[in-house]
Structure formats: structure tokens, C-alpha cells
Image: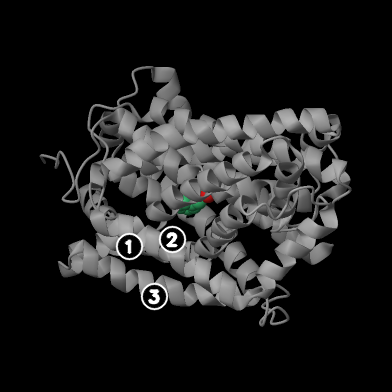
Amino acid sequence: MPRASQSIHGIWGSRLTFILAATGSAVGLGNIWKFPYITGENGGGAFVLMYLFCILIVGIPIMMAEVLLGRRGRQSPVNAMIELAREAGAPRVWGLLGWIGVVAGFLILSYYSVIAGWALEYVLRVGEGTFIGAKSEFAGSAFNELTASPGRLAFWHTVFMFMTMFVVAKGVNRGLEAAVRILMPALLVLLMILIGYAVNSGSFMQGFDFLFSMRTENLNANSLVIAMGHAFFTLSLGMGAIMIYGAYMPRNASIGATVCVVALLDTLVALVAGLAIFPLVFANGLEAGAGPGLMFVTLPLAFGNMPFGSFFGVLFFVLVSFAAWSSSISLIEPAVAWMVERFGMSRVKTSIGLGIAVWLVGLGTVFSFNIWKSFNVFGLTFFDALDFLTANIMLPLGGVAIAVFAGWVMREPDVHAELAIESKTIYRTWRFLVRFVSPAAVLFIFALTMYRYFTQ
Ligand code: PHE
């Protein structure tokens, strides 16, 4: 059967655009905000090692599978899966996989936007010079004041949702390419400057040690599942974001090499962010396990006490906001593409409708930091519960389904042709990982966590 050479939603200009767009999706709050804070909560070294291990043996193979499905399906994840299932002679229920992805992306965006809103607020606060010469108590209370105010959180959440839906309404867009090409390297440079500051401020080795030396005693029953969930979250896997970007990928680009570049860049940004943040945590006597506020309490301190701090600080939070922006677009793109295909609606109308819906759900996260703080689901706030459900359960399960589909359901010659890996060894290794190792690892981690949870 002849395959569509491009999707109705457009196509990337080149392989480089795909790399940039996928990196834009992968690098975001997950790397700079979430990775350090969950590493702090889960005791450092051993957790980081588990996360790196999951990237390598679960993340990269599944990412290749996801791009492969997207590029062959050339549609929204829901319709791509239905189409690919038909091609493989498998039941239509595989469309459900696309559906779960659409829902996961929708839910993740609802809280992602609230956190991105914090970064927007910090652009202003740092720019006003609020943190000049500040001490850690002040940085802590400034953050607590922000999260205690539903009005301020809702305001910035609204601004960020508006920014996201604006881009999505305009469609696959060259602006994204230019933004990622310039802003990603700039973000890395700024993180390096922060590391430089951390080296001078004294606690660099302590931070380094926290990140990279094994301390298994701090792990708890959930740590492993969180490390694995984060591997999916940070690579934007398991919900169709990478699938839909794969759908816009030109036929001649090599999937394996491209995916490795994206995964490497993503991991690099996370580790560099950790190396910038933890030395400051220890130098200022802060708590590594402080939770979601970790980055917003430590970095303003650095900017408040270094030369040209306000300038670098504003630039940093602007870049973080951009990184979050290019991720949020990919969180909602599967849903938008699906609605355009299904109802023939315009991108603009679809974006407005979905934007409002996501915004409403996001209010739940806004309130979970203040008026709903004591309202618990299984001992978690609304935000924590949503994060746990999406990142640690939905994405890994979506990822397993993707691996099973690419490894067991699709016809092998189709897989081979689409991946077009020349080296037999690499192809065979990938196939082995995707058929056996990745799904087994995910399921094993779930099983182990359940076991430890009930026996601890
Ligand atoms: N990978 C993004 C980050 O690290 C978040 C994301 C998850 C984006 C899933 C798209 C899909 O911030």
C-alpha cells in the first residue's frame, strides 16, 4: 500500500527541524524544575542512577518506537494507531492507546501551565530586583506567598495557557524552530554560568556528591516508579507527543540517530540543572527535599547575590518559560490534531475550545497549593495526585503499549523498512529491547513497587 508522504497537518522542513522540535518538547520544566526537586525528595545519587538507567534501556528504545509509529501513521495518535492496526491486521482497539495519550497530555498540560506560570512571575520579580542581597528565609517566604495566592497563580496560568494555545492555533510553525535553535543553547549557557557561580560559592562538591554518589538508604518504595515515570515524562514519551512530531518527520531522516541526539540533550540539561541547583541548596542550608519550590527558592538566591544577577536572572526565567512553552505545545498537539481530523474543525476553534477546558482543570492545581491544600486523594494533593497518575502510571503504560505494538503487533518488514537502520546489530539490539527488555522493565518496576508498598 502506498504511504502518505506527509500528514494533513504539515511536515517539518528537515531532519534538523524534527530534532529541534522534539528537543523543544523534551527539554522543559521536567528537566529544570522537576528533575532537581524529585531527586532531592528521593535522596539523590541512587535515584539519579535509576533514572539514567531507565532513559537508556526503556526511554531510548521506546522513543524510537514512538517516532516510528508516528511517521508511519502520519496522523493524530488516535487515527495513526487505528490505521497502523488495520495495516497489521490487528483490532481497532489499538486506537485506545492514542486516546489515553490525548487524555494524558491534556491532564499534564493543566498543571504544567500552572508551574510555567511561576516562571513567568519570577521573570518580573527578579527583574524588579526583589531578591538583591536576599537570604534564604526571604526567598522561601516569597515563594510561599506566591503559592498561597490563588489569584496570582490563576492569573499566570491564564497567561501561559493563552501563549500555548496561540501557537497551537497557528499550526506547525517555523517560529518554534527558530526559538529552539537560539534559546536552547542560551539556556545551557546560563545554566553553565550558574554552575560557575556554584563552584565559587563553595558547596559545589557537596552538590555533586549528592547527585552522583549512591545512598540507597534514602530510597523509598515509590522511588523506582518515580524515576521510571520521570524518564517518560522528561523525554515526552508514552502520550503521543513524540508520535505526532514523528508524523511530521520527513521520510529520509534516520530515526535512531535522531532519537539519540534528543535523549542526550535532554539528559544533559537535567544533569546540568541539578549541578547548578544542589550546590546552592547546601551552601544556603536549604532542604534538598523541599519539594516543588526547590528551584524557585534556590536560584533567585544565586541571582540576588551574584554580579549582574538581575540581568542573568531575568534571562534565565525567560528561557525557562520558553522551554516550558515549547513543551506545552507538544502536550496539546495530539488532541488538537485529533479534533481537526475527527470533526473537520479549524485549528483556531479547536485550540480555543481545548484551551478553555485545560484552563478549567488547571484551576484544580492552582487551588491545591492554597485553598484545597488539605484536600487529599490517597494522601496526595490534587496536583500531586494528577502528577503521579499521569507521569508515573499513564505514560509508562502508554510506553509499554507502544513497545508491544512496534515489537509484536506490526509486521516485521514494515518496522524494518520504516526504521531503516543499516547496522544489523543495532537493529537487532533495538528489537530485542523493545520486545522484551523495555516492557518487562516497566512491568517489573510496577510490580516491585506494589510489593514494597504493601510490605513496608
Ligand atoms: N518533556 C517535557 C518536560 O520535560 C514534558 C512533557 C511531557 C512534554 C510529555 C510533552 C509530553 O518538561
On the image, the x and y values in percent for residue 424 come to 39, 19
In the image, what residue type sits under mark 2? Gly
Residue positioned 57% across, 29% down in the render? 189
Quadrant that contains the C terminus: bottom right
Mark in front: 3 vs 1? 3
For disc 3, the marked residue is 357
Residue 218 seen in render: yes
> What is the crowding at mark 2: few (fewer than 14 residues within 10 Å), some, or many (at least 20)?
many
Are the residues at dot 3 and dot 1 in contact (C-beta closer than 8 Å)? no
Q: How is the image coloured?
A: one colour
Quadrant that contains the N terminus: top left
Mark in front: 3 vs 2? 3
In the image, what residue type sits under mark 1? Ala
The answer to whether the residue bearing label 2 lies less than 8 angstroms from the nearest atom of ligand 1 is: yes
Measured in 3D between alpha carbons, the distance from the residue under mark 2 to the one under mark 1, in whole angstroms, is: 8 Å
Q: Give the quadrant of residue 97.
A: bottom left
In the image, what residue type sits under mark 3? Ala
Left or right: 283, with 350 as reference point: right
For disc 1, the marked residue is 335
On the image, the x and y values in percent for residue 24 come to 43, 42
At mark 3, the secondary structure is helix
Are the residues at dot 2 and dot 1 in contact (C-beta closer than 8 Å)? yes
Residue positioned 39% across, 52% down in the render? 330
Disc marking residue 264: none
Looking at the image, which is closer to me, 353 or 216?
A: 353
Q: Give the quadrant of residue 70.
A: top left
Disc marking residue 105: 2
Measured in 3D between alpha carbons, the distance from the residue under mark 3 to the one under mark 2, in whole angstroms, is: 13 Å
Residue positioned 88% across, 47% down in the render? 217
